[in-house]
Amino acid sequence: MVNLVLNENMKIYRRVRTWVLIGLMATLVLYINFIEWHSGGKKAVGEGWRTELQQENQQWSEMLKLPELNEQNRTFYQEQISINNYHLEENIRSTKGTMWDGVNGSANLVILITLFTIIIAGDSVASEFSTGTIKLLLIRPANRVKILLSKYISFLLFGMLLLLILFVLSIVMNGILYGLGYMDLPLISMNAEGKNVESNMVLNLWKTYMLNSVSTVMYVTMAFMISSAFRSSTMAIGFSIGAFFAGNIILEVLQRYDWSKYLLFANTDLTQYLKGHPFQEGMTLSFSIGVLAVYFLVFNLVSWLLFTRRDVAA
Amino acid sequence: MSNETIISLSNVTKRIGRTTIIDDLTFDVPQGEIFGFLGPNGAGKTTTIRMIVGLMSITNGQILIKGKNIKTEFEQAIRHVGAIVESPEMYKYLSGYQNLIHYARMVPGVTKERIDEVVALVKLEERIHDKVKKYSLGMRQRLGVAQALLHRPSLLILDEPTNGLDPAGIRDLRDYLRHLTRTEGISVVVSSHLLSEMELMCDRVAILQRGKLVDIMPVQQFTRRTDKAQTYLIQAQPPEQALATLRQMEGVQGVKLTQEGFVEVSTEQERVPDLLVGLMQNDIRIYGVQMVSQSLEERFLEITGGKQIG
C-alpha cells in the first residue's frame, strides 16, 4: 500500500504540470498578500490601531441607528463593537496592522487549493485510461480497490502540501511586510454566551484551514468520481470546478425550497456555523456533517464500483 | 522439461449484451511452450488476452494460471503473468527507469539488481534514464518487454509484440523468447498478425475466428502440405522461353511467371532434375532453384476462407 502511494506520488511530482500549479499557488499567495498590504494594511501599522477601532465603532454605532437594518447585521455590528471595546479596554492590540491580519485573510485562499487539487484528481484516473497506461497498471498483484485508494491518498497529500505552502508563505510574506512583532497576539472573539474570549491565533488559523478544507475534500472526491465514471479528464475537471463556482448561484435560486438544505453546496461551508448564520433556519453543524458524510460515501462508492467492476476495453 | 500446465482456459465465454465475443474457448499451454494466437481482426484475440490478465470479466468458464483462478484469486494468479496488452503504453513524463521502478514496487521481491538485469537484457542501458517521450517505438517496445519480465513471470503474454520493431529487433525478440522458454521454462502466449513471424516463433498455433476456436496444431503440421507436389521457383533466362519449355513437359502443373520474373512450377521432387536438364538442353540459363513451402499465411487463408483478413 505504501508502495502504491509512492507510485502515485511519483506520477504527480515528476510532472512539470504539478510544479506549475505549485508555483502558481505560491505566486498568487505572495501577490495577493502584497496587494492587501499595499492597499490598506500598511496604514494600520504602528499605534494607529486605537484610532481605527474607535472610528470603526463610531461608524457601526451610526449604522445601528438606521431603522431599516436587519436582524443579522444588527447582531454583527453589536458583536464587533463589543470586541473592539474589549481590545481597547484590555489594551490588547487588534490584528489590524500586524502580520495576523494578512495571514488570517490568506486562509480564504484555500479556494486555490481546491481548484488545483481538483485538477490533479480529475485527471488522475481518466489520464490512465486515455494514455492506455491503465492496462499495465491493473495487471499487477494489487487489487483495484488498493490502487484507487492509493490515488485518493495521494491527492489528500497534495492538498496538504499546498496547505502547508499557504501557511508558511503567508506567515513569511506577512512577517516581512508587517514585521514579525505581535507573534503571540491572542484572537478575541465572542462566544455563544455573548462573552469576549481570548484564543490562540495559530490554533484558530488551523481551525479555519480545516473547516475550509472540508469543501476541498468534497469537491476533490467528486472530481475523482467523475474521473472514474466517465474516464475523461475534461469532464471531471470541468464539472467539478463548475459545480464549485456555480454552487452558490444555484443555492440562491433554490434557497426558498426547504429541500435545498440537502444539497451538497449548502453544507460544504462549515464556517457558516462559526459565524452563526446557517444557510437555512434549523440547520446545525451535525446536520451538515451528516449530509456531507452521505455525499462522501456515495461519491466514493460510485468511484469504487465503476473502477473495480468495469471492463478495461480502451 | 516438465509438462506442468501453466495456463488453462476452459469453456471461456465472453458476452457483451447479446453479442457473444468469445464462444466456448478451451486450451492449455504447458510449461516452456510458445503458443500463438492467430485470427483476423475482430476475431477476439485481444479480448481473450484481456480476460487472461483480468482486465475484462469472464461471462462463463474459467481461466487458471498455475492453478489459480484469475477471477477469484486475482493477486495470486496475476503474480505469475507478465504482459504487454496491445502497445506498451508507459508514463511518458517519467524516465524508462522510473517506469520500471513503478512496476517493481507493485510486486514484492523485485530488487534494484533485477531492474538493472532486465534493462541490460533489452539493451536499454544507455537511454534508460531518458524520458519515455523521447523513445522511439522500438525502444518503447523493448521497455514493454522489460516491464513484463521484471518479476520473473511463468507466463508471458504478448499482444502484437513485433509491432514497431525493425527486423533486427524482431530477430532479437524471437531469439530471446526461445531462450526464455528453453532455459527458464517460461510459457509464452503471443498474438500477431504477422503470420510469417508466428511461423518462426511458435510451437503451436490456435486459430480464432469470430470468437470461436477453429483449430489448434503444431506449427510444423500447420505448414506441411497434404499432397506430394511442391511449388518451386526457378530463376531462368530468358523466362519466357523457360515458361514455354516447361509447359510442354510431363508431370508439371501451374506453370506461371511471377511478378519478380521467376518461373513458378508445381511438381514432385523426383521430377526436378529432369525439368532442369530439359531447360538446359534448350539453352536456357538457370541461376537458381528454390522450394516454396506453403506459408502459414496461405494455410491460414485456406482455413478461414480468406475473407476475414483485416
Image: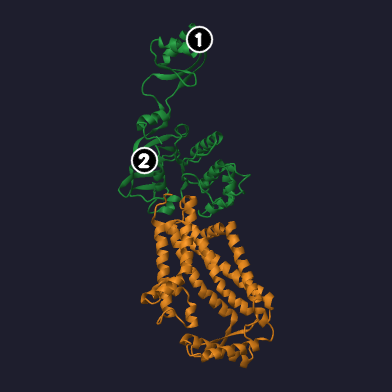
Name the residue rendered at 46%, 87% in the picture. Answer: A71
Q: Where's residue A127, x and y in %?
A: 49, 55
Q: Secondary structure at mark 2?
A: strand
A174, B137: nearer the viewer: A174
Q: Where's residue A90, x and y in %?
A: 62, 92
Q: Is residue A8 left or right of residue A101?
A: left
Q: Which residue is mark 2?
A: B27
Q: Which chain is orange?
A: A
Residue B304, image quadrant: top left
Name the residue rendered at 48%, 87% in the picture. Answer: A69
B54, A264: nearer the viewer: A264
Q: Where's residue B253, x and y in %?
A: 38, 16
Instruction: Tell me if residue A195 comes above or below residue B82 in the rendering.
Output: below
Q: Which residue is mark 1?
A: B284
Q: Looking at the image, is mark 1 or mark 2 earlier in the sequence?
A: 2
Q: How many marks?
A: 2
Q: Which mark is residue A309?
A: none
Q: Amino acid at mark 1?
A: Ile
Q: Which chain is green?
A: B
Report, in whole angstroms, how far the alpha carbon at label 1 lies from the one at label 2: 53 Å
Residue lying at the far top of the rendered structure: B281
Q: Is residue A292 left or right of residue A86?
A: left
B237, B198: nearer the viewer: B237
Q: Is residue A113 left or right of residue B294?
A: right
Instruction: Tell me if residue A112 comes above or below residue B1 in the rendering.
Output: below
Q: Chain of mark 1?
A: B
- Graded by Cα atoms within 10 Å as few (under 14), some (14 to 19) or many (20 or more), the crowding at tag 1 reads some
Q: Amino acid at mark 2?
A: Phe
